[in-house]
Image (tube, helix red, strand yellow):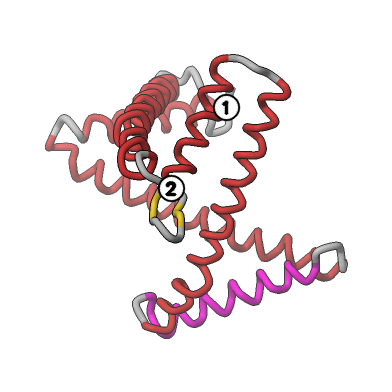
Amino acid sequence: MRILTAAIAVAIGLLVLAGYFLPVLAGIQSMLLGWAMILAGAAALLGVFNLISVHGEKILRREKGTLYSALLIVSLFATFIFALFLRPDHAAIQLLVNGIILPSEAALMGILTVTLLYAAIRLLRQRVDVMSIVFLSTVLLILLGSATLLPFGEVPFFGNVLRPWVNDVLSVGGARGILIGVALGTLTTGLRVLFAIDRPYGGK
């Protein structure tokens, strides 16, 4: 059984890969990718059902945080029903997104920013080296560049010179380096699966 699953995974992977180079196999590649999208959608749906099941059991057992679990389930069903009948581009759904979801995401990002700054300051207490100082200095420069002085607007030099340079040069270079690393890691993992060295589909 393990040999059969490995053979099927390797064959499908090779067909999808060959579809990029051989136009004859483009139809088979498209069909396989369509199946993969259907499976991904079914997995996401199972994840939603699992979320409902976990929080439903939490409500039935009256565990700690039951109110939040009930609020989650009610919000999930209400949003699904409204979006199903009104369609996602309806004004009411857009108002729901712009009035609740986006402010909640902004609040979470604000909390994350403060938490990361606090963690960076604590990092200096645990380990003082060059990289820690560079990291904390970069965070402070970005915060100063993003801050606004009410009477004068943005902080001079930090807001119009230093922050754009850090964002456009250093951040973009770092992001591209990370993406290249992710691409190489994905390529290596894919090749290991194609050669049946790694078998994440159940075999060893």
Query: Regarding mark 1 in the picture, which secondary structure is present there?
Result: loop
Q: Which quarter of the figure has residue 115?
A: top right
User: Is residue 67 visible in the rendered structure shown here?
Assistant: yes
Q: Residue at x 85, y 62 (%)?
A: 64
Q: Check the image and name the residue furthest to the top.
A: 129
Indicate whether residue 85 is drawn in magenta: yes
User: Is residue 12 visible in the rendered structure shown here?
Assistant: no
Mark 2: few, some, or many residues within 10 Å (few <14, many ≥20)?
Answer: some
Q: Observer-nearest residue: 60 or 117?
A: 117
Q: Observer-nearest residue: 72 or 31?
A: 72
Residue 123 image position (x, y, % from top left): 67, 27
Magenta stretch prevailing secondary structure: helix
Considering only order in the chain, which callout, 1 or 2, is on the residue closer to the N terminus? Answer: 2
Q: Amino acid at mark 2?
A: Ser
Q: Residue at x 49, y 75 (%)?
A: 99
Answer left or right for 75 relative to 180. Answer: right
Residue 45 image position (x, y, % from top left): 53, 60
Placement of the C terminus among the 4 image quadrants: top right
Q: Which residue does the numbered mark 1 point to in the structure image?
A: 203
Residue 161 image position (x, y, % from top left): 31, 38
Placement of the N terminus among the 4 image quadrants: top right
Work out whether 92 lies above or below 35.
Answer: below
Indicate whether residue 35 is drawn in magenta: no
Residue 129 image position (x, y, % from top left): 60, 15
Mark 1: few, some, or many residues within 10 Å (few <14, many ≥20)?
Answer: few
Query: Regarding mark 2 in the picture, which secondary structure is present there?
Result: helix
Q: Which residue does the numbered mark 2 point to in the structure image?
A: 146
Answer left or right for 59 relative to 27. Answer: right
Q: Residue at x 51, y 75 (%)?
A: 80
Q: Amino acid at mark 1?
A: Gly
Work out whether 26 lies above or below 59.
Answer: above
User: Which mark is drawn over residue 20?
Assistant: none
